[in-house]
Image: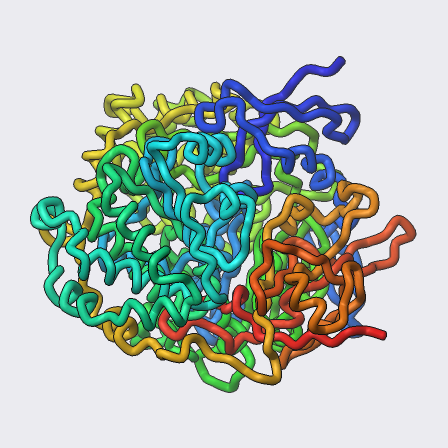
Amino acid sequence: MSEWKPTACLICSLNCGIEVQTEGGHITRVRADKAHPISQGYLCEKAQRMDAYQQGRDRLSSPMRRRPDGTYEAIDWDTAIAEIAQKLAAVRDEHGGASIFYYGGGAQGNHLPGVYAQSTLAALGVRYRSNALAQEKTGEAFVQARMFGCGMHHDFEHAEVALFIGKNPWQSHGFPRARLVLREIAADPARAMIVIDPRTSETAAMADYHLAIRPGTDAWCLGALAAILVQEGLTNRDWMAEHVANAEPVLEALAQIPVSQFAAVCGVDEALLRAAARRMAAAETLASMEDLGMQMGVHSTLGSYLHRLIIGLTGAFGRKGTSYAFVPFRPLGAGGGGSSSKASGAKDTGERNFRRAPVTGLPVIMGLIPCNAITEEILTDHPHRFRAMIIESSNPVHSLADSARMRAALRALDISVVIDVAMTETARAADYVLPASSQFEKAEASFFNFEAEANAFHLRRPLFPPREGTREEGAIHAALCEALGVFGEAEVAPLRAAADKGLDTLAMAFMQTMSANPVLMPFASVLLYRALGPRLPEGMSNAAGVWGVAQLFVQSFPEEAARAGFTGPLAGNRLFEAILGSPSGVVFAKQNGADSWQRLRTPGQQINLHIPEMLEALLALDPAGPPKDPDYPFILSAGERRTETSNTSIRNPDWLRKGALVSALRIHPDDAAGLGLTDGAAVDIVTARSRARTVIELHEGSRRGHVSLPNGQGLDVVGEDGTVRRHGIALNELTDYRWRDPVVGMPWHKYVPVRLEPVA
């Protein structure tokens, strides 16, 4: 029997530690890793799908170049790198680096591509980028920056009351050991769970208070809860006096909210709303979390603001069992990758406001432009439009709104390049495709490190050698930077010689090199890949960039690193050594709840309750509720996590159980009866953009007027005979880029008006 090897699950952001056995090129058995410092032996059923990821049928074995007729031809790596570098440099030199757009940088479990991509973006002078966070979390980030000035997470394990807004942790997790924690809360009579969700999800079924709102009315529901706290005198006044700023205009506005009217709009009994608000106010500790059910709906940014008002009104921050400011190993919103024109050779494009998208003017948040604006930034004759695009470890043709328009945008570019494991839907529209090694064929990691007290980082070791013809991202970006002429052997040689003598010698040489030639700093990751990568243990060269991340972390958070045991002038080296030597992960930082206050980047380190434009939006909420279209009377939630779904990195459907429904439309039995439909009947789903056919699944947990389709399906899958067939419904063939939040541009994927037409 083969040995058990530690690695991680790739399905959700928790990346729970697992141990696997392998045979040949297959993962044959999976079990929980009890040594993992965060998941600690916890696992759900989705980790059993890891071999389906590794066995993707549309993986590549050489770079691909698009022919004029739309077909692809295999080319060698030297040709691909040379042509791509030449064409990207030509766009940069003629139109400026700001005309080159970068999308991606990693998926749920692979964030090292983003570390190395920073160097390529710097070489090209790229100023604009985006990724999936810009269609999920930028509204939350917008209000968080204005109110707290830092990122935060939530301690449900120790909370007396848990509030979930548009979230079903039973399926989506979002915090460690989610199902165990949910069971503990549900079983404890001294604790309570409140769920705001139109559906009776697995989590809602466990709740003490299920606020089954009408789709798209989260803002009305949260506004009513906040107003009840104020109008009934339930706010935590003493705590607020010490920790909150600019409360008066907010309290005055909430005192005016017509709770009964808001309750009617969201379709929840007013007595239930008041009971839930009173339970939150009475709790010693409250932890709350929002997710895509709200964040991809109407008034999502306003909803994020109201959620944080509830935190501020109840005192639910900076204590065990509440929300807290975490210590990131590497910030997820780390810059746009741009450099000075001197470093990159980019054309000076004059004065520009890089805090706004160049064509639409929508805000750049976390360094990201809104995903729903991308096609508008390309399909135009605006002089500052995007003219080239690099897409890495992402599939925007499938995952972003209006797939047909995204395909057209890619074809309108001067050059488009995809770096990915598979020939994805996006790759099939690009000019060049560079095949990356899979997450199990190289050193890889995630920067979703959000723990409250002991935060951990897991550098995973490869399980298999790289597939022939593929390369890891460190090698790809190093080659691109060399072809772009930003560094060569003369710059690498002294660092390589220092690395031969050990990490401490490398640290000194690196500091001296960057001090003497600071123009090299933007290319640190690829320099490290060339100098340090070959000196790391076999198969671990892609981890070279983590050395730089470790150095930056101990400089930024010396006290937290010291509590975890990493001290002294070379603490970054000691941390990197611990990372390399800990196959199940290592704790890199320790803190306590009170430390959260020191991370607030607000005046007086107080929570700022007043965002004027958000308060105006609250008072301007339509008493008739969210927009409705009589031609499309149902509201579709496009992308529901279910037991039988995975994320789209798993492109091989063989893991699905025999007879499983693919892309079944869940609908309440009464709605189905009204249409003359029975369970399993065929139906056409029609939007203003397109239509798709599927079968219905009668579901008592669905709300009347609300239907849902699962996430992770609708992929164009290569069959055993080599033909391509779409497996399920591609949701974004139905959506429209114009359906988006007015503040930050996030899509309304959970509020898609549809019409259902029975199929004879």
On the image, the x and y values in percent for residue 684 come to 75, 72
Q: Residue at x 91, y 52 (%)?
A: 721
- Residue at the top extreme of this rendering: 1
Q: Is residue 660 left or right of residue 665?
A: right
Q: Where is 666 relative to 562, above or below?
A: below
- Residue at the bottom extreme of this rendering: 381
On the image, the x and y values in percent for residue 86 come to 58, 64
Q: Residue at x 59, y 54 (%)?
A: 701
Q: Where is 263 relative to 237, above or below?
A: below
Q: Nearer the viewer, residue 274 or 183?
A: 274
On the image, the x and y values in percent for residue 102 come to 50, 61
Q: Is residue 43 left or right of residue 555?
A: right
Q: Where is 696 relative to 237, above or below?
A: below
Screen quadrant of the N terminus: top right
Q: Quadrant of residue 221?
A: bottom left
On the image, the x and y values in percent for residue 554 come to 29, 32
**Can see residue 121?**
no
Q: Quadrant of residue 232?
A: bottom left
